[in-house]
Image: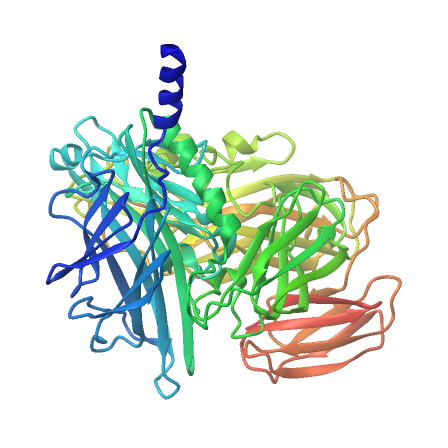
Amino acid sequence: MKKLVLVLLLICTAVFSRLAHAEITISDLGSNIEISNGDVSVTIEKAKARVVKLLHNGQSFLAPGQSGYFTLLGSDKDLPHVTQRVENCAFNIHLQTETTLDLSFRPPKSPGYPFDLDLHYVLRDGESGYYFYIVATKSAESPDATITQIRYAMRMDHTMINICLNDERSGTVQSVDDINNALGQVMDATNWLQSGEFRTKYQWSSPTDEAPVYGLHNGTQGLWMIRGGNESLNGGPTKQHNTCHGTDKGPIVLNLLYSNHYGSTGSYVSGEWEKVFGPTYVYLNHSTDADSLWQDAKQEGEKMRDAWPYAWLDNPEYPVDRASVSGQFNDIDTGWVVLARPYEFRGLDWQQQGGDSYTYRSRINSDGSFNVPAVREGKYTLYAFAPGIVGEYRKDNIEVDSTGETQLGNLPWKSRSYGKVLWKIGKPDRSAAEFRYGDDHYHWGLWFNYLNDFPEDVDFIIGESNERTDWNYGHMAMWIEDGGWKPKLDANVGEGEWKEPVWKIRFNVDDTIPGHATLSMGLAGVSREANLHLTLNGSPLVSYKNLTDDSSIHRNGIYGFFRERILTFDASLLNIGENILELELEMVKLPGKRTNYSFGVMYDYIQLEVEKDDATGSGPENYEPGPWIYPNPVEDMIYVQLPENANSGQFQLHNMNGQTVMSGALNENQNRVNIQDLRTGLFIATVKVNGQIYKNKLMIR
């Protein structure tokens, strides 16, 4: 009998996170307000809307003198960002029922900050944690405005340095002692420790959907950030956020409700507007071992995702009645679908959307099916991308009602093709994962290795070289100095100069190739604005200019903002025998001095295709080409070549505001379109042929 009691006791106490339902209490302590449900006690400073005391089972989680607090940045459009100060808040009880207590804190608007904010903390009975969310509004008469960052941060007890992001990524953040005894900083929030190791806050950055539950623990107690839904986030499933890192005041847990990191900029708010950011659930647990803490937190995350949208949130901008969107891709067994606005709305890729709107995402299942849950009523564009598939799927005008399911049925989707593949470097997966260091990139300073790894720069031979060893994860500017480029505490001191490497791709062609060739290039990321000049066999081929910055390289990333560039050229430029394609990096503005970090571009894939059916190389079976629009970029005349089985179609050109600037019939297999009267810039070219609609970005110079 004693053994049975002991076993039951161990089972009941393995994870101290569940509790019997208890009355929610609220106590006014003057400058603070204390709320409790019998298991969790949260003390909030009224004036600053910050959590100054957090207890679970009577044990504290915050570092002495530290808090949980909001950081809010924004501005009128095109102006430098302004910090919204969270002070002198107007406090009230937004909702109080037997099961839910929702507190509201409204700070007066800071000078230059464009939004009115309502900051909320929520405590519910029977739950071992609390929620926070923000309602942001803008009046119709105020100027267009930009959100820069909405962040919640918690500075934890010094013992809580163990981090878990998912089953594959866990470890420790820097301790207070590590930081206080460090040799110094080599970059923003990047310390050179006494051990010789470099530790940075970007070491634990992660895409949201790879860390739906994450947090810190000390082996016996844990604090976890849990999102039930991601609709208010910007940037889609590839968007990366900071999660946790060490500071000199204690380890910190971050929850980014909005940020411009990793290239997701461009979205802005116009006219009268309101949006709910969150809620995020802060979950607390205790246990006798670390694995139990983590397994319990994951289970809580599943429960929160199943409960989304939360029925207790009382706001008209947060409807509970939602619908799902489902469909099926054939021959696709992984990837993502995204519901967002069409690209033509403000010329924003879905990776840049989500500031003024809500976006939705879901994984593609192994059988090609997908189901996007909890979608608000409205009209959307469906995008999809998948590893190994060149190009992005798109379907416009998806109508979603407030309830039920929008069934899209079978959706035909094939890898984009312009002919036979002569050669390809990389796998189209929007990252540099398959290249050198791409599988182990969460280490600061990998760029210092380049000059030793590639003393003659990258010289890649198709058919002989190996992507994992012979193609670097980043094509970066290098600082050349005596003794070699190495980390220094005085990062900006030293004699030397910047070198912008030229990479080479060597390949053979066995025979004359008629017609056109198409070079497709996917860029996984760009750190600091860059130009890329391509030369084929000594002749200039194209210059891709002003590739915008996403800061992915020096933030330990192997991807940031994905973009593609497609060039069609006369295949007569290819030599019989050896050909050399050169990729010359040019930074738009190099720093005038030494730094401890680098910048440049990261490639996802590069692929050369030709028309000739029997050309050397392997192409897709059952090749069904779409129309070609070339050259791209263009100055005065484009050619629209239809598939072989088509001699007619329709052509439209839209600017980035969605306005039609040119349209007409295509009456030949190959059509000339004069665009010399159009201004320079980026446009969307639409070709309708054989009942299919094809859209491509077109750059007019």
Instruction: Using the image, determine if residue 478 lies above or below residue 140.
Output: above
User: What residue is shown at x 56% (from left), y 65% (from top)?
Assistant: 321
User: What residue is shown at x 17% (from left), y 32% (from top)?
Assistant: 178
Could one spot residue 457 in this view of the protein? no
Nearest the eye: 39 or 624? 39
Farthest-out residue, front: 1
214 left or right, relative to 505 = left
Q: Quadrant of the N terminus?
A: top left
Could one spot residue 92 in this view of the protein? yes
Nearest the eye: 567 or 54? 54
The image quarter containing residue 180 is top left
The image quarter containing residue 137 is bottom left
Instruction: Using the image, determine if residue 512 lies above or below residue 569.
Output: above
The image quarter containing residue 337 is bottom right
597 left or right, relative to 644 = left
x then y, percent, for residue 189: 23, 45
x then y, percent, for residue 209: 48, 47
